[in-house]
Image: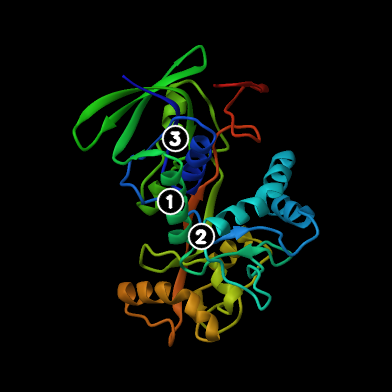
Amino acid sequence: MEAWDILVIGDGPAALRSAAVSAKNGAKTLLISPAALGSGGSTALDGLATPIQEMNNRGHREDTIKSGYFLCDQDIVTFKTNMAIDEMNHLEKAGVVFSRDAKGLPLTKKGIGHSSPRVVDAGDASVRDVQQVLEEQCMKHGVVRRGDQLPVLLASTKQKVDGVITLDMVNGRFIAIQTKAIIIADGGFEGIFNGNSIGFGMDLAMQAGLPLRNMEFIGRTPFGVADTKLTLSSNMLGYGADLCDEAGNELVADNLVELCQVISDTSGAVVDCRDMGDDKVWWQSAFRTVKSSTGVDMNRYTIGLENRVNQTLGGIATDEFGRAVIGSWSRWFT
């Protein structure tokens, strides 16, 4: 039987970052993914919110709480927004090329739901660059990564993790893996709606007796390209694109939920990227992808949009450090 200190399930930014940090701190780390390695999803599609142009994280914290309709745990929001600048610095030093302003600093844009410019990105390369850089960090620190490994059972004793049983979908064998801790970072069940892969971690947790919380909260984006499976980044609006109806009237809202409602109430919402100027260079890959899928050249024409599920928000209840909570905040499934 294999034995590891840390087992990470997933292959997106959260999983790769967790695995790299674990290995960097001396833990013998294995990362497994039910899908092929490198298919980490589109978590980084809209870049990273970080208050680098502000005195502190107060505005970021308050905007997050307000956009969450005051349902977020405010202590955890404070903890996470405090970490945002450090996480951006790590990605930048590791090799992510964020777009820059005239001073050479990462260029901040005002994202949907933000009261100040604080969203940084690498244009349409955000997903690819973040995935590639974090994969390199895993290799640098000696993380072992395996694709096509389906986790089927979490082994535990008295709410303490002993290991996991996985199905090797290449060889058709079941493999028992002993581990001291498991990090579940493979996403939610949004794949049910958009046809992509789904996370199996929540199923493992349910089998082990952990309750799932807030499963009714489902995030949507109004930037799904109509009649395709493509989803554009909302950050295009910060680069000069316009969201409008068929008559050319601009569509605006205070947050993403309200914007999705506006799109639903509008007949024929479109995004107009014709006046983005020199900033188009950051989105040429997205333009080419849309043209190859729909035949529409976004340099010359608008493209129709629709609301689409892009992530699910509920799942395993955790504290601010990601520890699975059992019943009360002082008890964890370890």
To which residue does mark 3 refer? 8
To which residue does mark 1 refer? 136
For badge 1, the amino acid type reads Glu
Earlier in the chain: of badge 1 and badge 2, it is: 2
Residue at horizontal 45%, vertical 21%?
208
Q: Which mark is residue 95?
A: 2
* Contact, mark 1 vs mark 2 (Cβ under 8 Å): yes
Q: Quadrant of the C terminus?
A: top right
Which element is circle 1 on?
helix
**Toward the viewer: 135 or 111?**
135
Q: Quadrant of the N terminus?
A: top left
Picture quadrant where residue 2 is located: top left
**Toward the viewer: 159 or 4?**
4
- Residue 127: percent from the left, percent from the top? 46, 59
For the question of whether residue 36 can be seen, the reply is yes
- Residue 68: percent from the left, percent from the top? 67, 50
Which element is circle 3 on?
strand
The residues bearing labels 1 and 3 have C-alpha atoms spaced at a distance of 16 Å
Which element is circle 2 on?
loop
Label 2 crowding class (10 Å Cα cut-off): few <14, some 14-19, many 20+?
some
For badge 3, the amino acid type reads Val
- Residue 285: percent from the left, percent from the top? 40, 73
For the question of whether residue 247 can be seen, the reply is no
The residues bearing labels 2 and 3 have C-alpha atoms spaced at a distance of 23 Å
- Residue 172: percent from the left, percent from the top? 19, 31
Question: In the picture provided, is 116 more to the left or to the right than 296?
Answer: right
